[in-house]
Structures are given as structure tokens and as C-alpha cells.
Image: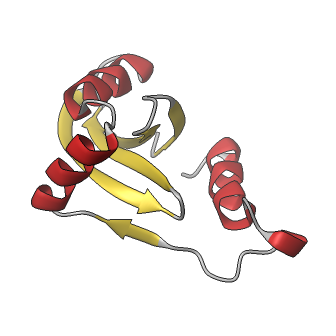
């Protein structure tokens, strides 16, 4: 179930930095492994292993399943999937520029 704060986060991605308050197109593009390595090096993004660990701490523990780096409009976001102790899978979204957690869902 998607939580209201996460919905607000997604909505803010739609309208952020828009003249007139409406985004013409929502852009989310995920990078492959080579592109991710290049982006981390050239843009000096946060270490993905540290982001994975912070995501697990944020949700109170969990087993790392997968992460990927995506560009959401102008921001780079790590999308990290974790298997929680209760068997549910959750995603934590972390800004790759500064390592700040910007949302989660799937509880």
C-alpha cells in the first residue's frame, strides 16, 4: 500500500521547478550498471553500499534485495528494495547527491 507521504513525494517530482506549476512530462530513467558506475564517479554521488545500509537502518532492518540508480527528472535517486523480517518487501528512495532518504513504500 502506498503511504500518503510517498504520494506527496511523487507529486512533488511532477511539479517541481515548473513554470506555471504543472510538469509537462514526468521523466524517470534507470541506469544500467556501467552507466551507474560512470554517474557515481563523474557526479560524485553517494556510495550505493552506504545508501543500502542506511535504507536498512531506516526501516528497522531487512535483507538487501536490489538497488538501482534512476534519474527522476533532475534528481538521481537510489531505489533500494529490502526484504523485511515479516516477509514484506519495501522500497526506500535515497537522493544520490547527498544520501538523504526521500521516501519509502511497500510496508
* Quadrant of the image occupied by residue 70: bottom left
Work out whether residue 85 can be spotted. no
Q: In the image, 91: left or right of 74?
A: left
* Residue 59, above or below 45: above
Q: In the image, 46: left or right of 11?
A: left
- Identify the residue shown where x is 50% and y is 29%: 100
User: In this orientation, which residue lies closer to the viewer: 37 or 102?
Assistant: 37
Q: In the image, 58: left or right of 82?
A: right
> Which residue is situated farthest in the right direction here?
20
- Identify the residue shown where x is 71% and y is 55%: 12
Give percent across and percent down for residue 51.
31, 29
Work out whether residue 27 can be spotted. yes
Give percent across and percent down for residue 55.
36, 27
User: In this orientation, which residue lies closer to the viewer: 5 or 76?
Assistant: 76
User: In this orientation, which residue lies closer to the viewer: 42 or 83?
Assistant: 42
User: In this orientation, which residue lies closer to the viewer: 96 or 88?
Assistant: 96
* Residue 41, above or below 21: above
* Quadrant of the image occupied by residue 25: bottom right
* Quadrant of the image occupied by residue 62: top left
> Which residue is situated farthest in the left direction here?
34
Give percent across and percent down for residue 2.
57, 52
> Which residue is situated farthest in the bottom direction here?
24
Amino acid at each position: 500500500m502506498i503511504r500518503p507521504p510517498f504520494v506527496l513525494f511523487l507529486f512533488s517530482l511532477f511539479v517541481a521547478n515548473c513554470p506555471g506549476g504543472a510538469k509537462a512530462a514526468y521523466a524517470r530513467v534507470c541506469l544500467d550498471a556501467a552507466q551507474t558506475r560512470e554517474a557515481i564517479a563523474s557526479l560524485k554521488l553517494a556510495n550505493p553500499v552506504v545508501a543500502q545500509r542506511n535504507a536498512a537502518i531506516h526501516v528497522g532492518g531487512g535483507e538487501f534485495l536490489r538497488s538501482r540508480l534512476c534519474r527522476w527528472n533532475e534528481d538521481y535517486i537510489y531505489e533500494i528494495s529490502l526484504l523485511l523480517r515479516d516477509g514484506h518487501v519495501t522500497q526506500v528512495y535515497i537522493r544520490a547527491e547527498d544520501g538523504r532518504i526521500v521516501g519509502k513504500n511497500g510496508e
